[in-house]
């Protein structure tokens, strides 16, 4: 049963009025992100939950196929990944999305969903519906407005808050743990810290999806004693250091951790600190493993396959990506922080110092801004 009522507000007010709001209810190691075969979803035994973590580069996307065949798509990577994502869904036999979930409005999570909304019938759209101004988010909301359900109606648009629950199949429960009202403001990244965090419980075990939640968001989860324990953890924020800490991992206590990350990304994800915390766990990474399929049956056995084999050396698979920061960076002579030239928070022109490389900036005593390291 769904137990939350959604309301209209902020940037999505007009959209919600138009869309409608529902009552609550031993080969050599592969090259990362090299070409890989299409993931295959085999007919699953009764009471089996299947989850596919798609390789969408530096972004997130996961498909949940419930035991009754209903589907939930969680995020979709950047906009340029949308067509390939739709192809992958078609190749594994997905003809409609029952629940399309946007964990937060950053482009590496919602961009690819725009093409999905244009290409497949969608039953419901879940969104945190926070006031956030960006061209990609506006395009996403427009795609929601123009999308259609299998019977030609507009999809339900549901503003998700902690406490919402869903029973998509017998014995399966989805529970939203975050965000809560009032939404967090004034953090390093309000969209990240207000990410939709939710559990999926099935007869054989559980999954925890975390979006890009950071320190402030985790602290709120601790304060309300959210039920975080799960067998499989989707590691927050592509393995960034601000997405995971020892306390969080102790509360989740996962058997398996999945990092959705692009090879050689500019941020250096996954960060060394996060990988150190994950030592001793079974860790899967989309940059190494490609698409990752997990099948969880009532017998509590977790079967995992992937479209690429990870490096032979477990140590190699636990190495952080080396950031591809090439070319000029801009330093702030006051804060001693350096930025990428396209950073939205560049210092005032009179405070700028130009460096030929990040290495040159660091030799001069500057440290990277969040736009460089992805925090």
Image (cartoon, rainbow, N blue to C red):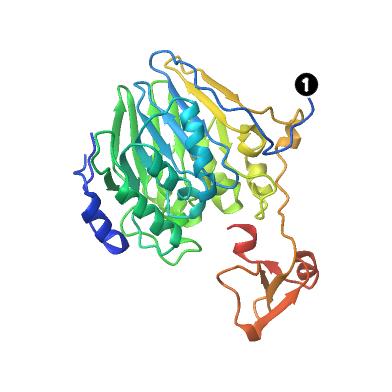
Q: Residue lying at the far left in this picture: please name it.
A: 23
Query: What residue sits 65% from the left and 77% below the top?
Result: 335
Image position, residue 117 (x, y; %)? 38, 43
Res 198 quadrant in image: top left
Image position, residue 316 (x, y; %)? 75, 36
Q: In which quarter of the image is the N terminus?
A: top left
**Left or right of 60 on screen, residue 131:** left
Query: What residue sits 69% from the left and 36% below the top?
Result: 34
Residue in front for this viewpoint, 297 or 352: 352
Query: What residue sits 57% from the left and 35% below the top?
Result: 257
Count of numbered circles in the view: 1
Query: What residue sits 63% from the left and 42% below the top?
Result: 277
**Left or right of 101 on screen, residue 356:** right
Task: Say which element carries label 1.
Answer: loop
Residue in front for this viewpoint, 166 or 30: 30
Q: Quadrant of the C terminus?
A: bottom right
**Left or right of 223 on screen, residue 310:** right
Name the residue tied to disc 1.
26
Regarding residue 7, the answer to whether it shows in the image is: no
Res 267 quadrant in image: bottom right
* In the image, residue 208 above or below residue 323: above
* In the image, residue 361 above or below residue 210: below
Image position, residue 282 (x, y; %)? 62, 30
**Left or right of 264 on screen, residue 132:** left
Regarding residue 173, the answer to whether it shows in the image is: yes
Badge 1 local density, few (<14 within 10 Å), some, or many (20+)?
few
Image position, residue 72 (x, y; %)? 39, 34
Residue in front for this viewpoint, 305 or 179: 305
């Amino acid at each position: 049963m769904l137990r939350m009522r959604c309301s209209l507000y902020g940037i999505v007010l007009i959209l919600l009025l138009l869309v409608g709001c529902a009552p609550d209810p031993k080969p050599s190691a592969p090259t990362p992100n090299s070409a890989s075969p299409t993931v295959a979803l085999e007919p699953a035994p009764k009471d089996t939950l299947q989850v596919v973590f798609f390789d969408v580069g530096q972004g997130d996307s996961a498909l949940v196929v419930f035991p009754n065949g209903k589907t939930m798509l969680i995020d979709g990577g950047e906009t340029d990944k949308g067509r390939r994502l739709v192809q992958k869904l078609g190749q594994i036999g997905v003809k409609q999305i029952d629940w399309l979930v946007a964990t937060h409005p950053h482009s590496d999570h919602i961009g690819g969903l725009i093409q999905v909304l244009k290409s497949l019938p969608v039953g419901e759209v879940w969104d945190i519906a926070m006031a956030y101004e960006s061209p990609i988010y506006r395009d996403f909301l427009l795609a929601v407005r123009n999308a259609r359900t299998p019977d030609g109606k507009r999809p339900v648009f549901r503003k998700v808050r902690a406490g919402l629950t869903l029973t998509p199949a017998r014995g399966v429960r989805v529970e939203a743990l975050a965000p809560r009202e009032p939404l967090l403001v004034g953090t390093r990244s309000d969209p990240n810290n207000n990410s939709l965090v939710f559990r999926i419980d099935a007869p054989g075990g559980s999954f925890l999806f975390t979006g890009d939640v950071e320190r402030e968001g985790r602290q709120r989860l601790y304060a309300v004693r959210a039920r975080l324990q799960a067998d499989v953890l989707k590691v927050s924020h592509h393995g960034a250091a601000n997405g995971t800490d020892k306390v969080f991992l102790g509360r989740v206590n996962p058997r398996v951790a999945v990092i959705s990350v692009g090879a050689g990304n500019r941020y250096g994800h996954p960060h060394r600190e996060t990988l150190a915390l994950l030592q001793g766990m079974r860790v899967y990474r989309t940059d190494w493993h490609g698409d990752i399929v997990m099948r969880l049956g009532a017998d509590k056995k977790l079967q995992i396959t992937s479209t690429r084999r990870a490096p032979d050396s477990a140590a190699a698979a636990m190495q952080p990506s080396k950031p591809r920061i090439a070319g000029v960076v801009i330093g702030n002579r006051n804060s001693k922080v350096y930025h990428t030239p396209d950073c939205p928070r560049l210092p005032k022109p009179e405070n700028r110092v130009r460096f030929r490389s990040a290495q040159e900036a660091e030799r001069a005593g500057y440290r990277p801004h969040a736009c460089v390291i992805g925090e």
